[in-house]
Image: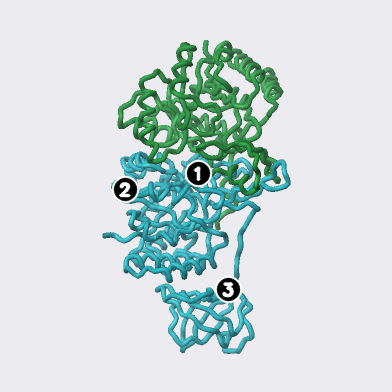
Amino acid sequence: MDRIELLSPAGDFERLKITLLYGADAVYIGGQEFGLRANATNFSLSEIKEACTFAHALQKKVYLTVNMIFHEEDFAHITSYLQDVVEAGIDAFIVSDIWLVSYLHTHYPKVEIHISTQSSSMNIETVQFYQKLGAKRVVLAREVSLKDIRKMTSLGVDIECFIHGAMCTFVSGRCVLSNDITNRDSNRGGCSQVCRFAFDHETSSKFTMATKDLNMSHHIKALIEAGVKSLKVEGRMRSPYYLATVIGTYRKLIDAVYNHTLDDTLIQYADRVLSRVANRETSTHYYFHEADWTDQYYTGRQELSNQDYLGYVVGYEDGYMMVSERNYFTPETEVEVFMPSGKVVSFVIHEIYDEEMHLLDAARHPEQILKIKVNEEIEIHSMMRIKPKEGNHE
Amino acid sequence: MSMPFMVYPSDLYLTRYIKQQVTTFVLAINNFSTNYDLTVTIDDIDRIQKEYPEVTLFVIINKNIFNDELQALEDLLERLEERNIGGIFFYDLALLSIHQRRGFQTPLVWYQTHMVTNHRSCNFYFQEGVKYGVLSSEITVDEIVSIVRNTRMRLIVPILGYPVVAHSNRKLLTNFYHMQNKKETSSQLEIVEPVSKGVYEVKEDASGTTFYKGRLLNGTNALCLLKDEDVSYFYLNFWQVPNDQQVQILALYQTLLQEDLTEEERDALIKKSEEILKSDDTGFFFQKTIYKVKKHG
């Protein structure tokens, strides 16, 4: 039986590399045109090719978003663009505009077509309609419950579901508030996230509708048992640290389900790690009940950040881990280093040196290379963070 | 001669529209439509068709459909098939799928609100048997012309009404009032975006919450530019438009369509429409949206 796929966003090549190393089975990326994140860094054609080469060497896949809703002017370069990205080696297109589904199936039958969540597919008939057009996979709308998902996983088309990250307040494709307020076209990748604005009304309080983030870490087993093909994490504009943490955590949860080692200790550990990297509270939204007042914020922007991420490991030599600094820390800080392989090492930092082995009283310069003694060998691309409270899990 | 208008009426007293040569109406079906205040049942449709035999009725089924609603949707389509319906506006592709599977003949109208923005997708649906499409309110007159000239699909252009700008399955007003600890609640709330000063009407019903733009779209200028293009219908949504304004604007449109006007006369009519409707908001008819706010290196 095929194992479920863990699908990660990647806003640029650095993020793609990190997230694949930390356990994603596939990544979805945007080119510099035709996607729904027009203002992310995105990938040039040569970077798409490089991304495919890197991913395929690891037996992993690259999916390209071409999921904008086209206007007449957008057709100018699309044909040559599609040809170019197919030649670059992408494994699937993620699309929502219907003409493109038909076009791709005719012209590139060997490249998978995935129907974007922008199309808000919520039922069996719709999934089967796309299947008839040649879609290999449908990304279900975020409004679909687990009960309904179960009804759609045996139709002969792969089902993909979001499991983590930001949520839209509105039904995907059914919101043009961004167009109206900022003139930025939400269905062409320009969304200015107006749903996170606070609005005035007749009383002194503000009307807000911002949603909490999605977090399905407690329910991975249920999603696997439901027959879902791919679990998708949101966030092409998120940092490499965020991706490493979230993808690494879900990797552990998924592997534990298949290895029959999933237990409360791991779930609680995942909770602690994910809550430290989140900048909003989380909920399961529509999966188990109709979304309600507990899934939203009511007092304007509620975004938190922390300085947990201390450094990125660039090497290990003679018992010293070489770290590129990300946030201020001092000796006696209790840290853990989490590695692409999933291994985690915890320790207290005793001494911090610079590259010339001068002893420092603190790490205070971002991207400065520091040396820290660690007895255990540390993998390159590992990340060092403040140790989450209440234990550890390896 | 009937005017090329398709009207969503503010109530079911259709005589006053018929008197002004409007004979095509759009009605939203109870339980299967969203964003529409006035909804009807099949029995209402039967009654209207009996009372007004000269009218053509289109019906709107534009909510997103969940699995447990599919059978009821199929039953509804079957009942509509037994009637003489001008067309069914659809959003969810489940409707198209069922329609094709059952071999129904009632014409379909592609009505995916903000997604009907290019001729290629119009052509796709036309080949799938969809006769009409309602163009998005977020495209320019130039884009409309390009679409009209490149598809055989019969097109409907919304030119008047309070545009829907967002729809959520969430109960955003219920949630808001819950957090406010308010005992007295309303299903409608006016909100203002403080920077742009944009006003929105928020309305909640069983299917979720809809945001409407607070200013009436006045597409009179667009109508002038498009009247000689091959547009099948201009769509007028009279929800919350006072009756006297409806009468006056229909009379003005009649003049505008029937007479060969000079530029000055046309401009005067546009000006008059602004006075009647108390709005000069032309939406996106003359304003292109952007989506890239920075250049990539």
- Find out whether the residues at labels 3 and 1 contact each other: C-beta distance under 8 Å: no
Q: Amino acid at mark 1?
A: Val
- Whole-percent x and y of residue A297? 60, 53
Of badges 3 and 2, the one in the foreground is 2
Q: Can residue A46 be spotted in the picture?
A: no
Q: Is residue B133 above or below residue B171?
A: above
A273 lies above or below B154: below
Residue bearing the label numbered 3: A326
Q: Name the tint of chain A in the rendering.
A: cyan
Residue marked by disc 1: A171
Circles 2 and 1 in contact, beta carbons < 8 Å: no
Inspect the image, locate mark 2, and give the three-letter code of the amino acid beneath it: Val
In this rendering, does residue A19 appear at all? yes
Q: Position of residue A64 (x, y in %)?
A: 42, 53
Side (left or right) of A163 relative to A356: left
Task: Tell me which amino acid carries mark 3.
Answer: Arg
Q: Chain of mark 1?
A: A
* B55 relative to A357 in the view: left or right: left
Q: Residue at x 68, y 28 (%)?
A: B279
* Distance CA(mark 2)–CA(mark 1): 22 Å
Residues marked 3 and 1, same chain: yes
Q: Which residue is mark 2?
A: A157
Label for residue A21?
none
Colour scheme in use: by chain
Which chain hosts label 2?
A
Residue A360 at x, y percent in the picture:
62, 86
- What chain is colored green? B
